[in-house]
């Protein structure tokens, strides 16, 4: 199977973000980056599918400035075969502009499956996968938490509010991957060494027009919190009293 | 004329709260800009009886599309139907829910129309020209204000962000055809399983009682369920440690890679408070934590913490909550 995986480089989230001067972007100083959470699940899903018969190849595609190559190398070190870097000065927020560039790069590539993350952890949009599928005219299943592919078709499971659905689709298809699917593997040392020699092609990206922009940013109010009211079951009456009189939720 | 479109989400022949939220949002824009609200209701034959309910939340016109192929969610035919309507209607804005189905549907529609989409919106300025909307990014640690410079402005609304408001009117009903043959869809939902319908979904529940690895075993989750039952209006959530071990389904997981929730009350039981878990529940109005480790990070954001053993405290709390509700 020939599989493409679209991956994004995103900041690691366990920090306190600051708004940069200008007020419409995050201050990038001190941030560390990695492949976005769900995109690593998509890479893992691709590796599992490929490992079934080890035919064809997996191509990782990332749109971004030169630093996107680090993210592609990470995927290569997990076992992806080659990379395509779609070069831009900065990644736009408008997912449709990104989808147009990805669709352009994917078109005619002969992929049986094109995988995306369910959403990019930084933009938190969850739109690029389904948009790219539409632009390519391919069937699409979003937020797959289980996946089975055989004989030119597939079955996926999607989680719903209070339920789930089982979805069938023909190949070629676009899928966006949710977390339940499989824990992403860690790169091994031989994997990291091999990744350095794997092909990584750089192409200019053909971004669409940007019509959705971040024009302001703010940090949500800090939680007061941090109040321990007691120890053991003896503290329960006080908790119930506070829930009734102070929080008014009981 | 500035008409506004709302997608009236239904499942198994019944409107979801998401439908009323979308119509309520559309009403706000229509009132600010002077236009009508057109709600699109798609479903299996019989769905038309729900049209009237949409008028209660402010729909002036309900477009009903009935087809046996819409018994389950049918993404391709639904997207074609919505896109056809939006193409023909000169709408200024279109609202969907950021529900599982809405998040699937809206980007398909956006791409068909060649438009951007503001996803998972928690607040919007109905009067602004061009429209602006707030959307949490970076796991909710930053709130971005988005400006949508394309018409119609396509928006998915975070469930719960726009509480339904009744502004009753008698909606006109128009019957329409699917924008594509539902039987010809390549992507087919074969089966839908719905959990216990008496149980509240995490998105709708005013109270969430959530359990972590501190509960030690799947069967001990009944302590969490009993406390939820005692509240009467609570849903049960879990950490990834718990869903990984299969004690609860992945759909119950709260956090960065699970559900994002914002209830009035969140009770964290035997949960350490890892940053990825906090990402999903930090915006809850009141947070209670029960943990035997007084240094657990969950206490840093808890309004009320109790240090101690969950097996001692939770049953006592369940009893006290039951009594408090009885004597009310
Ligand atoms: C990319 C990524 C994404 C992730 N996404 C999520 C996510 O979406 N949601 C999520 O929840 N996690 C997520 N995680 C995992 C997260 O980092 C934590 O591992 C997880 O939240 C821990 O779950 P826990 O609190 O149940 O378990 P633990 O961290 O093991 O905590 C158990 C707690 O129970 C307490 N305890 C034990 N016994 C008792 C007792 N008898 N009485 C009282 N207290 C007791 C302990 O003191 C401890 O604080 C993610 C991790 C990564 C790397
Ligand atoms: N700059 C990018 N390069 C490659 N893939 C991307 C990029 N941005 C988004 N994607 C893919 O689209 C998915 C959804 O992104 P988003 O719609 O921004 O949440 C991500 O999980 C990635 O798989």
Image (cartoon, rainbow, N blue to C red):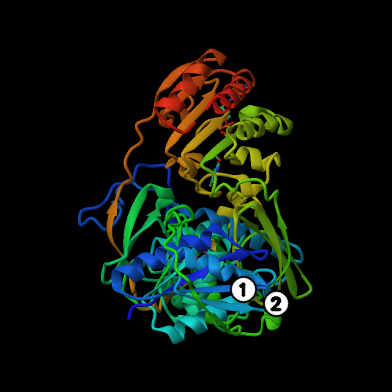
Question: Could you say which is closer to the camera, residue B251 or residue B326?
Answer: B326
What's the mark number on residue A191? none
Marks 2 and 1, how far apart at CA: 15 Å
Residue A96 position in % (x across, y down)? 43, 73
Taking the image as drawn, is residue A174 in sight?
Answer: no
User: Is A53 rendered above or below residue A180?
Assistant: below
Direction bottom: furthest residue: B88
Give the residue at x 58% y 39%.
B234
Q: Can you identify the residue that label 2 sits on?
A: B69
Q: Say left or right for B157 vs B199.
A: left
For marks 2 and 1 on the same chain, the one whose residue lies earlier in the sequence: 1
Give the residue at x 75% y 75%.
A152
Which picture quadrant has residue B193?
bottom right
Front position among marks 2 and 1: 1
Direction top: furthest residue: A234
User: Is B159 rendered above or below residue B91?
Assistant: above
Taking the image as drawn, is residue B10 in sight?
Answer: yes
Mark 1 surroundings: few (<14), some (14-19) or many (≥20) residues within 10 A:
many
Q: Secondary structure at mark 1?
A: helix
Q: Secondary structure at mark 2?
A: helix
Question: Could you say which is closer to the camera, residue A12 or residue A73?
Answer: A12
Which picture quadrant has residue A110?
bottom right
So how many labels did they put on this image?
2
Residue A50 position in % (x across, y down)? 70, 65
Give the residue at x 39% y 54%.
B137
Say if labels 2 and 1 share a chain. Answer: yes
Q: Quadrant of the N terminus of chain B?
A: bottom left
Q: Can you identify the residue that label 1 sits on?
A: B48
């Amino acid at each position: 199977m020939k599989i493409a995986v679209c991956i994004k480089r995103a900041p690691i989230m366990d920090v306190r973000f600051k708004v940069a001067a200008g007020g419409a972007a995050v201050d990038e100083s001190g941030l560390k980056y990695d492949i976005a959470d769900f995109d690593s699940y998509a890479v893992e899903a691709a590796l599992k599918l490929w490992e079934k018969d080890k035919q064809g190849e997996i191509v990782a595609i990332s749109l971004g400035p030169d630093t996107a190559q680090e993210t592609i190398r990470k995927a290569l070190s997990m076992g992806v075969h080659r990379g395509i870097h779609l070069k831009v000065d900065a990644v736009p927020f408008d997912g449709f502009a990104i989808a147009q560039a990805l669709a352009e790069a994917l078109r005619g590539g002969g992929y049986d499956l094109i995988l995306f993350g369910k959403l990019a952890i930084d933009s938190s949009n969850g739109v690029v996968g389904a948009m790219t599928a539409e632009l390519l005219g391919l069937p699409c299943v979003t937020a797959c938490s289980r996946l089975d592919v055989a004989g030119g078709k597939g079955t996926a499971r999607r989680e719903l509010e209070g339920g789930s659905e089982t979805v069938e689709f023909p190949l070629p298809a676009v899928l966006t991957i949710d977390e339940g699917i499989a824990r992403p593997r860690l790169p091994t040392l031989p994997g990291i060494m091999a990744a350095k020699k794997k092909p990584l092609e750089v192409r200019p990206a053909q971004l669409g027009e940007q019509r959705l922009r971040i024009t302001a940013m703010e940090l949500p109010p800090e939680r007061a919190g941090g109040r321990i009211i007691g120890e053991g079951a003896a503290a329960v009456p006080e908790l119930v009293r506070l829930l009734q009189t102070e929080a008014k939720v009981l | 004329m500035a008409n506004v479109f709302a997608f009236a989400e239904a499942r198994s022949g019944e409107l979801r709260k998401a439908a009323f939220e979308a119509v309520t949002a559309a009403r706000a824009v229509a009132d600010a800009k002077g236009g009508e609200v057109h709600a699109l209701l798609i479903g299996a034959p019989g769905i038309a009886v729900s049209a009237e309910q949409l008028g209660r939340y402010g729909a002036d016109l309900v477009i009903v599309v009935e087809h046996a192929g819409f018994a389950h969610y049918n993404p391709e035919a639904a997207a074609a139907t919505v896109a056809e309507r939006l193409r023909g209607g000169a709408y200024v804005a279109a609202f969907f829910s950021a529900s599982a189905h809405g998040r699937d549907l809206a980007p398909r529609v956006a791409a068909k129309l060649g438009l951007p989409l503001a996803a998972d919106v928690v607040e919007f300025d109905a009067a602004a020209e061009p429209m602006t909307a707030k959307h949490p990014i970076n796991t909710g640690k930053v709130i971005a204000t988005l400006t949508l410079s394309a018409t119609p402005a396509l928006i998915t609304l975070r469930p719960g962000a726009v509480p339904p408001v009744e502004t009753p009117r008698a909606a006109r009903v128009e019957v329409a055809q699917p924008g594509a043959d539902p039987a010809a869809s390549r992507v087919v939902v074969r089966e839908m399983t719905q959990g216990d319908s008496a149980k509240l979904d995490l998105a709708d529940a005013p109270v969430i009682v959530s359990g972590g690895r501190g509960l030690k075993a799947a069967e001990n989750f009944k302590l969490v369920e009993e406390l939820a039952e005692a509240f009467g209006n609570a849903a049960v959530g879990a950490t990834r440690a718990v869903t990984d071990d299969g004690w609860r389904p992945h759909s119950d997981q709260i956090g960065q890679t699970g559900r994002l929730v914002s209830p009035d009350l969140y009770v964290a039981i035997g949960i350490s408070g890892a940053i990825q878990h906090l990402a999903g529940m930090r915006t809850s109005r009141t947070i209670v934590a029960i943990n035997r480790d007084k240094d657990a990070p969950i206490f840093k954001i808890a309004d009320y913490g109790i240090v101690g053993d969950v097996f001692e405290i939770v049953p006592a709390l369940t009893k006290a909550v039951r009594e408090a509700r009885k004597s009310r």
